[in-house]
Amino acid sequence: MMKFERYEWVAITIMISLFIFVGFIQGWSVSLVILNMCIISAIMTMGVNISWGYAGVINFGVMGFLAMGGLAAVLVSYPPIAESWQVGGRGLSISFALLVVLVIAVMYINKTVIQKRNRYIFNFLIIFFGILIIRHFYLNATHNIEDVNPAIAGFLGGLGLPIIFSWIVGGLFAAGVAFVIGKVALGLRSDYLAIVTLGISEIVVSVLKHEEWLSRGVKNVIGLKRPVPYEIDLQNADWFINLVTYINSSKLNNIIDVSDRQQVLNNLIIDGSGIFVKLSYAILFLIVMLIIFYFANKAQLSPWGRMMRAIRDNETAANAMGKDVVKQHLIIFVIGAAIVGVAGAMLVTLDGLFTPSGYRPLRFTFIIWIMVIVGGSGNNLGAIFGGFVIWFSWIEAAPLTTFIINQLTIGLEPTNALKLHLLDSVPYFRYLFMGLILLLILRYRPKGIIPEKVRHS
Amino acid sequence: MIDFLNSIIVLLNFIIIPGISYGSQLALGALGVTFVYAILRFANFAHGEIMSFGAMITILFTWFFQSQNIGLGILPTALLALPIGIIATIILCFISDKFVFQYYRYQKSVPVVLAMVSIGVMFVINAIIRIIIGTETIKFSDGQKFIMKAKQFKVMTGLNEGLALKSSQVITILITILLLTFTFWFLQKTKTGKSMRAFSDNEDLALLSGINPDRVVFTTWIIVGILACVAGTLYGLDKSYKPIIYLNLVLPIFASAIVGGIGSPFGAVVGGYVIAFSEIMVTYAYKKFFVYILPSSIEPTGLVQLLSTDYKFAVSFSILVIVLLIRPSGIFKGKVL
């Protein structure tokens, strides 16, 4: 069992009281919406924190891994579209099989042909012609698929399984992509690696945006099935009505008029159903977060975690002690990416829709990194804290800015041009806050708000 | 023969001229990134926003001049406002260095920390730009739009294909040549330039020889400010100004700098053109070209396009990855100015 220090308890208390505060001021529904996103952000942050905080492997591809998780949510939960499979399934399978053959052929050439120049020539020829042939089948198939009922379908659909499975599949997808990226890029210096992962995540997103047969691209996938009940079902369910009546019985009993009472009850049920749905999400997410938190801590305290810290602090020394640095870097990069992928699937589950064009690096890579830095890299509780605090301020920045601007310009007339302009640009102040928070933390508390514990063992 | 000429014109019109002007913009941007990398030794993620800031100031003053009816006739008014933009950008660079980067330089922080810091700076500048000018797309090019219209060219030469030459493209190319010549002259011939090269080659040795590091950093930020502002304004003049675009532009710029060999200014310029041309060449549909050049019996039926234009952006990164795999130090071995 891990023990929390006093300041860690303070952090946890602050997090909880923030939501209670918002609950009372802006309503419980708002509070729960923020809480859900905070939990997801915390999971993303833990994913990044594992690779950066434990082993010093930089991962700027957060956006790409999130998008892979989102794709998993679509592919797992969307009902299969039989017609698409009929018209395009064969072509796609052929092109996929050919692709596998091509990869094997290239690997074979690289193994057998020793002379460097010949190897390049052979590789170039086989890849060039291979791609020409594959393109033929592939373009035909995808074209056919995209023509199937383009207004509502136009893609392959998924497996039609409960969306909750996609959380695992999303992790696996992201891990697969991370494995390839890691194989290619992990030998690079850290700032190169940052740029390369950022770039590859852009490639991943642009593939999802434009391969319509797979993800419906910019046309978005909507109406993904929820793992929790729908509001409308709840409002008609007897047990839920009874529950609401029971909870509010004292309030309801004070109302004597029957029709009035029914009116109040109906309103309570409608409000309650929304809150119930969000609460069920929150509980599901919280379970995932706690599981990941538990294992992340366990791993950090294990001999493996110690080895990771050794590699992070002095790669050469760790290498000299016989640790396989390259392999461990790859492992931790993949694990971190997998956790981010889980969060990506959860994000799409929460929204119920998949919008590839919504993945932007500012929002999905850099903000997550601010969370990691602010929370404290190398400390899982810090990561969760960072996720909560930054997402919270990201959301609450707008009301706060409006308040501040109104206070500052209180002497000006309501039609003053400067005041109107400032009020118009309220949404952009959150970037300013984020930047300032990051700069201040890096300057005055470079190890984060909850720094990594130094262990002497 | 006519067919051959036509095909050449097609290539010129759709690949070479856009490639050169886009490449020039990337090259100027990449040169700025390279200077920061070689002298201050970190990857400056804020560079795109610095470019955007310069362009924004230029636009504001262009509007001011336009409202005062001051113009340059056939040339865009933005050229008149450009020097003011450059000064503002240099001041921005100084401020960010004074309040942010300097501290970490004195602390001798690792490059990654500085890269994180530059992300913070990026957010702040990004917010300032959005607060001042909003997120709308702004067109601010005025004056004569085309030097040669496609129709004029057709009439002039009697060919089937037209060659359009936008004045913004010509201005981009001319200014780039001017600026590159100046930069390389400065680095090779002047004393300050030589001290910068020495500093980037071996900091300790340079310090021992009595080179003042603060002066080197000061000059670097001036050059970076000039390059960034000009690159940002030219990009905005050529396409249109959109604050969000510049964040996306950072990635091809980094790609150019790394492909050319990060730390090598000549490499950065070459990298810019390599990235620009490959982006355009890979996503261009060659059908028209082949129709002219091949006999009609074997004319292609499809578009003859390697990748759809949607992947324009992905191309630069694929090249980056390939270069890093085959030749990690870039085309021209980087590291020294």
Image (tube, coloured by chain):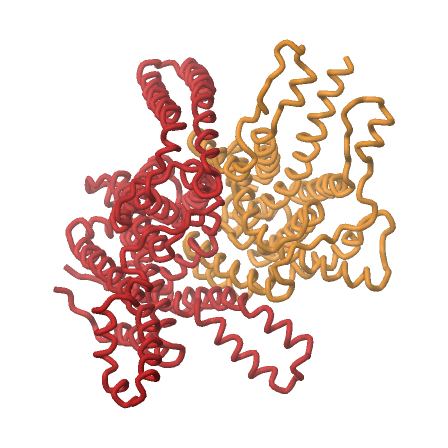
Chain colours: A red, B orange
Residue A186 in view in this figure: no
Query: Is A67 in front, or is A7?
Result: A67
Query: Which quarter of the rendering shows the N terminus of chain A?
Result: bottom left
Residue at point 35%, 34% (across, down) = A82
Above or below residue B147? Residue A254 is below
Query: Is A312 in front, or is B309?
Result: B309
Query: Which quarter of the rendering shows the C terminus of chain A?
Result: bottom left
Is residue B166 toward the left or the right of residue A141 in the image? right
Q: Where in the figure is residue A164, as x and y percent of width and height?
A: 26, 51
Location of residue B147 (image quadrant)? top right
Q: Where in the figure is residue A427, as x and y percent of width and height?
A: 53, 67
Location of residue A41 (image quadrant)? bottom left
Location of residue A421 (image quadrant)? bottom right
Residue A144 in view in this figure: yes
Instruction: Return the residue found at the far left.
Output: A1
Is residue A294 toward the left or the right of residue A445 in the image? left
Query: Is B287 in front, or is A111?
Result: B287
Residue at point 34%, 18% (across, down) = A105
Above or below residue A257? Residue B127 is above
Q: Where in the figure is residue B122, as x and y percent of width and height?
A: 52, 58
